[in-house]
Amino acid sequence: MSTDFTALFDEWSDSYDETVAGHDPEYNEVFQNYLHILEEVVKKAKGNTIEFGVGTGNLTELLVKSGKKVCGIEPSAGMRKVAKQKLSEVKILQGDFLTFTHPFQSVDTIVSTYAFHHLTDDEKEIAIRKYSSILEDDGKIVFADTIFEDENAKLSMIRKAENKGFHRLANDLRTEYYTTMPILKGHFEQNGFTVTFTQKNEFVWLIEATKQRRE
């Protein structure tokens, strides 16, 4: 994650929970069913779990309550501070999707919500390759994030946001690295995963990738 994104999340740390709760009308549809989406990620996770983009620790807290052993990775000092206030017993380490350490000898699940789009498509492929090398056979990647079925769907959503006067949202969709389903599917399959996509709201899809057993 770039330093620009890290600075943004430092500034956002104090109000992030209000945003995901729907207090910002411009992003209300993005975070629609927020708690349900987090709960779906938790249901798919198993065993030793690495979480990327911990933010303020909302998913982390649910993972811990469900009995998962969790190591959180978060690049923003502001977000780490808020998360550690909620979860003093959980390891929340500085790092990002590409540069990280973790305390587990084996990793069963890698999870993330609302964050993977901060990587370019090339960086997404590099990250997935890294995760394939550390996950156990049948290990899972479970991400929830904004993706699009194709480029036309992305352009349509940008126009819709502009027509509603949601200019910050339209700019985010235009300038951040929101990818398309075929690109992401290709990255997973090239690195030994089977992957499914389940739409959870107008923007967010649940991405579940399972690492194939080695012969």
Image: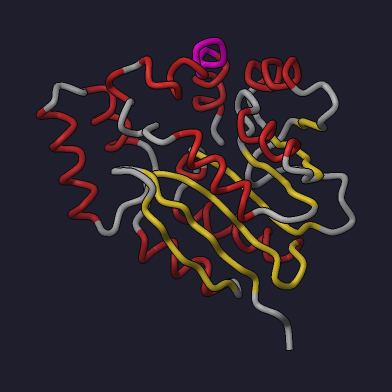
- Residue 136 falls left or right of residue 78: right
The answer to whether residue 101 is visible is no
Q: Is residue 131 above or below residue 155?
A: below
Q: Position of residue 102 (x, y in %)?
A: 82, 45
Residue ranking furthest to the bottom: 215
- Classify the position of the N terminus by image quarter: top right
Identify which residue, 139 or 120, lies in the foreground: 139
Q: Which residues are magenta?
A: 11-16
Q: Name the quadrant containing residue 140.
A: bottom right
Name the residue rendered at 32%, 35% in the picture.
Answer: 175
- Residue 97 falls left or right of residue 117: right
Q: Is residue 169 above or below residue 67?
A: above
Q: Position of residue 18 (x, y in %)?
A: 46, 15
Name the residue rendered at 49%, 47% in the picture.
Answer: 144
The answer to whether residue 122 is visible is yes
Identify which residue, 28 or 73, lies in the foreground: 28
Q: Position of residue 74 (x, y in %)?
A: 67, 31
Name the residue rendered at 28%, 19% in the picture.
Answer: 25
Q: Is residue 198 above or below residue 119?
A: below
- Residue 71 falls left or right of residue 117: right
Q: Is residue 14 magenta?
A: yes
Q: Name the quadrant containing residue 21.
A: top left
Identify which residue, 153 or 96, lies in the foreground: 153
- Residue 146 falls left or right of residue 40: left
Q: Position of residue 166 (x, y in %)?
A: 21, 23
- Classify the position of the C terminus by image quarter: bottom right
Q: Is residue 26 magenta?
A: no
Name the residue rendered at 37%, 33% in the picture.
Answer: 32
Q: How many marks?
A: 0
